[in-house]
Every structure is written in C-alpha cells, then in structure tokens.
Image: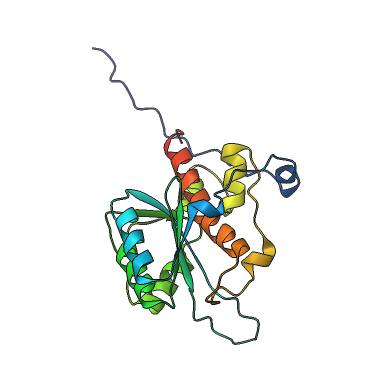
Amino acid sequence: MLARAMNPPQRAAAHRDTPSSDAIALLPAFERLGLPQIHLVATPAQAAAARAALCGAAVLGFDTESRPTFQKGEVSDGPHIVQLATADAAWIFQLHEPASRAAAADLLRDAAIAKVGFGLGDDKRRIIIKLGIEAQGVIDLNAEFRRRGYRREVGVKGAVAALFQKRFLKSGKAATSNWSNPRLTDAQLLYAANDAWAALRVHQALAATPA
C-alpha cells in the first residue's frame, strides 16, 4: 500500500527588518505627486468633482492629518483633513467645509472601496468622533508587513525603502503644522497627498509580491 502523502509543516515567516535610518538616507528619492496632481476639496463644486472621480475606485490610499496639540491635557479636535489617493492623483478634503466633509464621509463609509494606509487605528477612532461615521474597508498595511515577518511597525518610510529601495521624503515642519488652517500651504498639500499616495503604491507592490 502506498504511503499517504503528508502536507509539509507550515513554516513561520522569517524575521525581517526594514533598512536602518542610515541606510535609507543613502537611497535615491522616491517619486512624488506634484501640485498639478493634487486636488483641494473645499467647495461644493470641488466636493462633487471629488465624489465623481473617486466613487468607482476599488482601492484608495488613505490618511488623515490633525492640528498638533502642544499643551498638557489638550485634546485634539482633528482630523482636520482627509487624504484619498489614486495611482495618479490625490484629493485633500478640508473637514471644516460642510460639502467637503460630507463627500469625505460618503467615501469613507463606502465598503466597496478599500482604503489602505499605515497606523490607521487612531484615524478610524477620530473619524467616528469627527464625522459620526465608521470608516469601512480600511486596510492597515502594518498588518500585512507583520504577516510577512517584519517585527516592528514599518511605516511608510520603511515600507518604501524595503519594497522600492527608495527614500520617502517627509517634512517634519509640515507634519507639525496647523492642519486646521483654511489656507493650506503648498508644502502641506505635498506632504498630505504623498502620504496617502505612497500608501497606495506600497499596497500595489505588496499585492504583486508573494509573501
């Protein structure tokens, strides 16, 4: 009688780490969206255009930004903007504008659209408080990196370095700027848009790469 074939034991994913900060500093810069590819959503007409452009998307890069708090015990009333990105453009929704706020809420609660990003647990909690809705279809890319054996939180900079061998540029000054300002600077638009866009690029690369 032939011996019955046995399934090989499943191996745990090998431990992996992203390149060190010093190694990342030596890498060439990762490409970015430019201002012509970034759409600010702050009027009813812009909100309608954003809905039309994004409502049929299968996957969007996703992030939020909040005005930082500096006083002990101060509670943030963010997020103040929501960023959603396709493969070739990004939309920045300013949440103090009613039409922009409504459009962002509609897109975020659409379960047919996957929203991918990094460290989104706090973003989801803040959105419930801010918009009164629960974001659907949210995929935290850190979970996929953990499944692939990365021991630490990866983040967008580490992910871009690991997958593309490129250095993702982030401005510390923009990160801690006033995101509740009705007039966002070009630096803020570039920072916010590219955070969401890079997350989408990472998601696409992971989907194309066996675990």
Q: Quadrant of residue 173?
A: bottom right
Left or right position of 90 against 177: left
Left or right position of 173 against 127: right
Rendered location of residue 177, percent (x, y): 63, 72
| Residue 207 position (above or below residue 103) | above
Q: Quadrant of residue 139?
A: bottom left
Q: Residue furthest left?
A: 1
Query: Depth check: 83 or 141 in front?
Result: 83
| Residue shown at the point (37%, 73%) measured from the top left | 101
Rendered location of residue 53, percent (x, y): 34, 54
Left or right position of 174 against 9: right
Task: Report the number of numbered marks.
Answer: 0
Query: Depth check: 148 or 101 in front?
Result: 101
| Residue 206 position (above or below residue 9) | below
Rendered location of residue 5, percent (x, y): 31, 21
Left or right position of 106 against 178: left
Figure quadrant of the N terminus: top left
What's the colour scheme? rainbow
Rendered location of residue 172, percent (x, y): 68, 63
Q: Is residue 36 visible?
A: yes
| Residue shown at the point (40%, 79%) measured from the top left | 129
| Residue shown at the point (63%, 37%) measured from the top left | 165
Q: Is residue 154 visible?
A: no
Q: Residue furthest top?
A: 1
